[in-house]
Amino acid sequence: MKKNNAMKIYKEVFSPIEVNTFIITGDDTSCVVIDCGCYGKAEEKRLADLLSDLRLKPVLLLNTHCHLDHIFGNAFMLDRYGLKAWFHKGETYNLISSPKHAIMFGLTMEAPPEPAGYLDDGQIITASGLNLEVIAVPGHSSGGVAFYSGEDGIIFTGDALFAGSIGRSDLPGGNHEQLMNNIRTRLFTLPPDTVVYPGHGPETTIGEEMRSNPFFS
């Protein structure tokens, strides 16, 4: 768990693709779930048990993008908690194509639920005592976004920026130069001590990635 000011963050790693799912709260009673990646009944139970143990009620489901590993648990969130996901409209293709993409990974997946609605660049999301700014960072996928809390000095970058790496750009909708430019102009302009919570792997900071990420050296 990481706590900065009001925000508490709980991370679970799900599925054979090892995606980070984040549960965040600022009021200790409700929570926002980012990139629900639980795959199969055992992982669904693990997530439900964690939320029960924390006494947190999910009130909002967000997706940084809709590659299959980041939306495996969307159907569960709808069935269990009545929540549909919010994401950028540019992710419609990835949402629709996810069952076919699952087959390529040797996995199975039912068609995911339709979205609750779409997110726009610059939009402020207010839920669970938190304020999150939507920052568009396409390049890994056509509608990829990050969720930034300036109050807490935290950003959830999905698969745009990792500790020591960046997202792949060889999937449909990917564009390497666009991704590099968006990281430089949308993420590296944030305060250097901003803590980065990526879609895979460990946390880092904006300053650390500006100094040592090999893609920008």
Image (cartoon, helix red, strand yellow):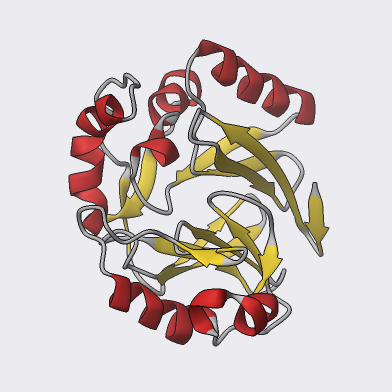
Q: Residue at x 38, y 70 (%)?
A: 137
| Corner quadrant of residue 210 | bottom right
Give above or below for 47 relative to 145.
above
In front here: 41 or 103? 103
Q: Residue at x 43, y 41 (%)?
A: 70
Give above or below for 101 relative to 62.
above
Q: Residue at x 35, y 37 (%)?
A: 68
Give above or below for 175 relative to 82.
below
The mark total stands at: 0
| Corner quadrant of residue 212 | bottom right
| Corner quadrant of residue 169 | bottom left
Q: Position of residue 118 (x, y in %)?
A: 30, 54
In front here: 121 or 212? 212
In front here: 170 or 199? 170
In front here: 170 or 111? 170
Q: Position of residue 94 (x, y in %)?
A: 24, 45
Q: Position of residue 190 (x, y in %)?
A: 59, 83
Q: Horizontally, is 179 left or right of 211 in the view?
A: left
Q: Horizontally, is 122 left or right of 188 in the view?
A: left
Q: Position of residue 209 (x, y in %)?
A: 62, 76
Q: Residue at x 78, y 24 (%)?
A: 53
Q: Quick one: quadrant of the C terminus?
A: bottom right
Give above or below for 205 relative to 158.
below
